């Protein structure tokens, strides 16, 4: 039996705050977020990069945290679903998911939400095809995706109204 | 509002598309699912699973594993010998295999360790010696004479060969019915098995205190049944066991019966005195399964030239996998509900479930009714075409009537099938398109019916199926306690909406305490689309009891008769002079001062007269039935055989929609899930192995495959439902699969007699050399 690898000490920037912690060099970002930082909003549905439930933003872009080593994310801003809401106000994407019933069991929802936030940061008026393309890596077994697509479009519309308001 | 009355002047919550009360936690990631929980000193568990489909266990040696640093405890079948099963008639499972294993993936041992990696490493250090036995991997294999196929999978079974259950029911004069027919249609179909693939992998966390009290959190749709099985298997008093169902990350029937890791978590928590968590990997979820049975179907239907069904004979053979699960009920369900949709002169049903060496099948959304519905609606389409009838108007002509009895003695109450059929036909212009679209394009229609809860519980008892308690706090907050488990369908919101509506408060003033066997009255669980009807009625009764006391107190304060009290907008006011009012909180305090602690209780038990009096009559009865109709439009690529679903329009009679947005969501999700089953989802095996136990190869429709689904809510008034409601969770799935199959038949001019309709089958049907996929003549179910 070889000796267990030792943990590394590193600083991660998670949801706008630096946290210094020790984790195994082969620990995934998913494991560090959920198990070390107790940010359990990020879910796992396969741990093989197939379902999209574990999606978080790294450097502002969606990544599958189950396939990303935490060690790769040092000094790169990480945003999980817990970092999406501003103070106690829901992000327009969250509000639209809530208003339209786009979350049923809610297990895939955090992954969809961070991916949708990323899409709407690029454009607040995506076409339906663009919405579907941006969310194509995410599986949902409850909704048939219909209300998810509608919610992302509604969030974009509300963001445009606010920006122009 | 019928005899449930008292909808009165209010109606601010019921019928409104309000955001779900559990939505806030779900969109922020704050909802705590079972695997999100952690406790100090928590141990992590892993299961060692069988690499053999069928083998005798000669020995298990785990000394080496136990010596691995970090491993705390190991258990095998010897440690947990009590047999269990969700149905009292089929107690055929143990937590870990004893003497032999019956499918690849069956748990053989459990390990708990300081961390998950260590537990996983330790599984590789357990040495199990097996003696392989011949495996039984198909319905044909299972029906074959046991002298040829080797040892029975369950040697103690009294049935011949590997038959688990066979049932035979006849209603009316079948022979006379066929003799009276102008045409008899005789077809065979095969519905492939598939699985739930809920996004959340099952998880269970258990704690056992020094006082011997055990608490188990589990992603279960049936906390009450789990409670009973944990008590039985751990041989401890149920009074010392508390089961809590946290939010469930999708169920669809896959979390409806106790399975090994839950019982293992409870066992190890008690054995070690430390918190224990078991979370399955995705691959393990595929082995845990309890999904849709593969079913071979033989369907003979006699019709007059006008389409009247004079006789129908249905035979089903179910591939049950290695254990009983809900299989006896599933077998009956394959035959129970066809007559709930259409009138038949005579009906006979023979069902036969067999054991095979595959992960056990069980209930998936539509439980046993989905497969024969696919066959029947496919054949009905062929009948309509042969007789030159419009598929929609034909179905409406033979549909059952509201407030009638079916040929198999089931009581039908409200029935919106005709409204649903017209809605989908009109929305899509079905009549103008069917048979007239360009080659490669097709349109198909189908209808269905489903339960609003099983009329009988899983284990016989005379107690209510659902209970609720409503408590009012001195601050005006209301809490409803009910044993339901929310797997995403919205049962928490349903309870809150009914109570808020009844008491005239805002929905966010109602808190829901659900799925906790210490705190909540029993509800039998989230299965058979029963929760809105049964728990909703219980919650409504409980809220009405509180309302009466508040009304009495408010009436005294206002100096009016209690009947004049209306409840809305957080006030109790005089219906005739609405300015005379009390705030809800003040009225509640006055009621508490008058009557003491302000709590109401309610129960729901289905009526006793729902079914006939014959063996097997317990499966199929329901206090009400929902009705659905679907039209699908497809485009088929003649080069590749690929089917693209362009449009799904799905109308569903849910009684009254308590929350139209949630009802639409159930309809949309059903359309999507049915589409996956029709076109791509399959439990596929290569020799003894599940071929695709992962979410990449087990194909489910992505957001790019799924069209924007058009949900149509058909409202009927169900007099016995809470505020007139029926169900929406399962029923809408059933017509989707045959609607797509019928659309494909319209597009390619040939019938494919099996699911899923993968490109290979389309090309076979198109080239005609192999012909549409036909099955061998069925082996007679009458063997048993």
Image (spheres, rainbow, N blue to C red):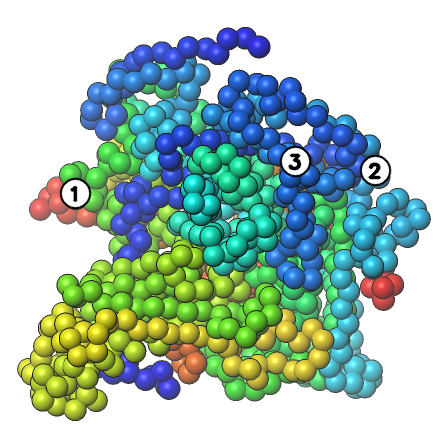
Classify 10 Å Cα crowding around label 2: few (below 14), some (14-19), many (20 and above): some
Classify 10 Å Cα crowding around label 1: few (below 14), some (14-19), many (20 and above): few
**Residue B9 position (above or below residue B272):** below
Location of residue A73 in the rendering, given as x and y in whole percent from the top left corner: 33, 18
Q: CA distance from mark 1 to mark 2?
A: 61 Å
Image quarter in which the N terminus of chain B is found: bottom left
Task: Name the residue nearer the viewer: A84 or B36.
Answer: B36
Q: CA distance from mark 1 to mark 3?
A: 49 Å
Q: Residue furthest top?
A: A2
Q: Which residue is mark 3?
A: B76
Q: For the residue labelled by badge 3, is the local secondary structure a helix, a strand or a loop?
A: strand
- Give the letter of the chain under mark 2: B
Image quarter in which the C terminus of chain B is found: bottom right
Residue B612: name its quadrant.
bottom right
- Give the letter of the chain under mark 1: A
Can residue B269 be seen in this snapshot? yes
Q: CA distance from mark 3 to mark 2?
A: 21 Å
Q: Residue at x 77, y 65 (%)?
A: B166
Q: Which residue is mark 1?
A: A88
Location of residue B436 in the rendering, given as x and y in whole percent from the top left corner: 58, 64
Task: Name the residue nearer the viewer: B124 or B18.
Answer: B124
Which badge, 3 or 2, comes first in the chain's sequence? 3
**Residue B588 position (above or below residue B695):** below
Numbered mark located on residue B133 in the image: 2
């Amino acid at each position: 039996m070889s000796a267990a690898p030792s943990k590394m000490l590193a600083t991660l920037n998670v949801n706008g705050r630096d946290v210094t912690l020790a984790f195994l060099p082969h620990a995934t970002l998913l494991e560090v977020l959920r198990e070390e930082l107790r940010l359990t909003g990020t879910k796992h549905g396969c741990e093989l990069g197939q379902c999209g439930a574990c999606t978080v933003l790294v450097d502002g872009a969606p990544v599958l945290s189950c396939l990303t080593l935490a060690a790769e994310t040092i000094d790169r801003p990480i945003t999980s679903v817990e970092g999406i809401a501003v103070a106690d106000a829901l992000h327009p994407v969250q509000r639209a998911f809530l208003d339209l019933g786009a979350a049923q069991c809610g297990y895939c929802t955090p992954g969809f939400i961070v991916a949708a936030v990323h899409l709407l940061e690029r454009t607040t008026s995506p076409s339906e095809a663009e919405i579907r393309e941006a969310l194509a890596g995410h599986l949902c077994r409850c909704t048939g995706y219909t209300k998810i697509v509608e919610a992302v479009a509604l969030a974009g519309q509300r963001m445009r109204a606010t920006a122009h308001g | 509002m019928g005899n449930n009355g008292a909808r009165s002047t209010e109606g601010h919550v019921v019928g409104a598309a309000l955001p779900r009360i559990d939505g806030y936690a779900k969109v922020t990631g704050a909802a705590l699912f079972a695997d999100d929980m952690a406790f100090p000193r928590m141990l992590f568990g892993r299961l060692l699973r069988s690499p053999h489909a069928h083998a005798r266990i000669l020995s298990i040696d785990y000394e080496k594993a136990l010596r691995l640093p970090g491993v705390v405890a190991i258990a095998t079948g010897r440690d947990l010998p009590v047999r269990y099963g969700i149905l009292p008639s089929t107690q055929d499972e143990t937590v870990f295999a004893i003497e032999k294993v019956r499918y690849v993936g069956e748990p053989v041992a459990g390990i708990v360790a300081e961390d998950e990696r260590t537990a996983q490493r330790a599984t590789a250090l357990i040495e199990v010696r097996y003696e392989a036995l011949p495996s039984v991997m198909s319905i044909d294999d299972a029906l074959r004479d046991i002298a040829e196929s080797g040892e029975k999978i369950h040697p103690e079974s009294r049935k011949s060969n590997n038959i688990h259950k066979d049932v035979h029911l006849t209603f009316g004069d079948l022979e006379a019915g066929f003799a009276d027919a102008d045409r008899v249609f005789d077809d065979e179909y095969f519905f492939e098995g598939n699985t739930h693939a809920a996004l959340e992998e099952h998880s269970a966390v258990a704690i056992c205190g020094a006082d011997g009290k055990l608490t188990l959190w589990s992603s279960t749709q049936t906390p009450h049944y789990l409670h009973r099985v944990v008590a039985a298997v751990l041989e401890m008093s149920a009074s010392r066991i508390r089961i809590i169902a946290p939010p469930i990350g999708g169920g669809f029937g896959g979390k409806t019966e106790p399975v090994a890791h839950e019982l293992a978590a409870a066992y190890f928590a008690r054995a070690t005195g430390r918190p224990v968590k078991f979370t399955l990997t995705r691959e393990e979820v595929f082995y845990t399964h309890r999904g849709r049975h593969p079913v071979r179907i033989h369907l003979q239907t006699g019709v007059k030239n006008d389409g009247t069904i004079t006789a129908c004979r249905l035979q089903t053979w179910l591939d049950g996998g290695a254990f009983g699960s809900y299989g006896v009920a599933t077998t009956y369900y394959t035959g129970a509900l066809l007559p709930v949709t259409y009138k038949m002169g005579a009906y006979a049903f023979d069902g036969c479930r067999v054991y095979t060496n595959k992960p056990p099948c069980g209930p998936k959304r539509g439980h046993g009714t989905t497969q024969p519905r696919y066959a029947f609606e496919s054949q009905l389409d062929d009948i309509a075409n042969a007789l030159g009838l419009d598929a929609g108007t034909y179905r409406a002509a033979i549909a059952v009537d509201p407030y009638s009895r079916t040929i198999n003695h089931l009581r039908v109450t409200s029935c919106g099938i005709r409204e649903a059929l017209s809605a989908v036909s009109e929305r899509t212009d079905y009549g103008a398109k069917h048979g007239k679209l360009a080659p490669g394009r097709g349109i198909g229609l189908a209808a269905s019916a489903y339960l609003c809860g099983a009329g009988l519980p899983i284990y016989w008892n005379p107690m209510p199926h659902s209970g609720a308690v409503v408590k009012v706090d001195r601050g005006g907050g209301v809490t409803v306690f009910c044993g339901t488990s929310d797997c995403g369908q919205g049962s928490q919101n349903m309870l809150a909406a009914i109570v808020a509506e009844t008491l005239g408060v805002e929905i966010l003033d109602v808190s829901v305490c659900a799925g906790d066997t210490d705190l909540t009255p029993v509800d039998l669980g989230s299965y058979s689309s029963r929760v809105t009807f049964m728990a909703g009625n219980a919650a409504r009764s409980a809220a009405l009891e509180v309302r009466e006391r508040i009304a009495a107190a408010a009436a005294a304060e206002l100096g009016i008769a209690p009947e004049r009290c209306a409840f809305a907008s957080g006030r109790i006011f005089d219906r005739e002079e609405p300015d005379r009012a009390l705030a809800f909180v003040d009225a509640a305090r006055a009621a508490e001062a008058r009557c003491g602690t302000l709590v109401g209780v309610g129960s729901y038990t289905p009526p006793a007269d729902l079914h006939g009096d014959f063996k097997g009559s317990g499966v199929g009865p329901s206090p009400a039935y929902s009705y659905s109709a679907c039209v699908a439009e497809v485009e088929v690529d003649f080069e590749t055989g690929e089917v693209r679903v362009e449009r799904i329009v799905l109308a569903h009679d849910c009684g009254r929609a308590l929350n139209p947005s949630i009802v639409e969501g159930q309809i949309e999700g059903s359309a999507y899930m049915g589409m996956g089953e029709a076109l791509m989802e399959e439990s596929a095996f290569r020799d003894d192995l599940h071929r695709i136990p992962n979410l990449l190869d087990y194909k489910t429709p992505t957001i790019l495959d799924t069209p924007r689904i058009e949900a149509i809510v058909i409202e009927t008034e169900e007099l016995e439902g809470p505020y007139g409601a029926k169900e929406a969770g399962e029923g809408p799935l059933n017509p989707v699969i045959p609607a797509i199959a019928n659309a494909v038949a319209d597009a390619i001019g040939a019938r494919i007699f099996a699911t899923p309709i993968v490109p290979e089958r389309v090309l076979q049907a198109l080239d005609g050399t192999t012909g549409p996929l036909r099955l061998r003549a069925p082996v007679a179910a009458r063997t048993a």
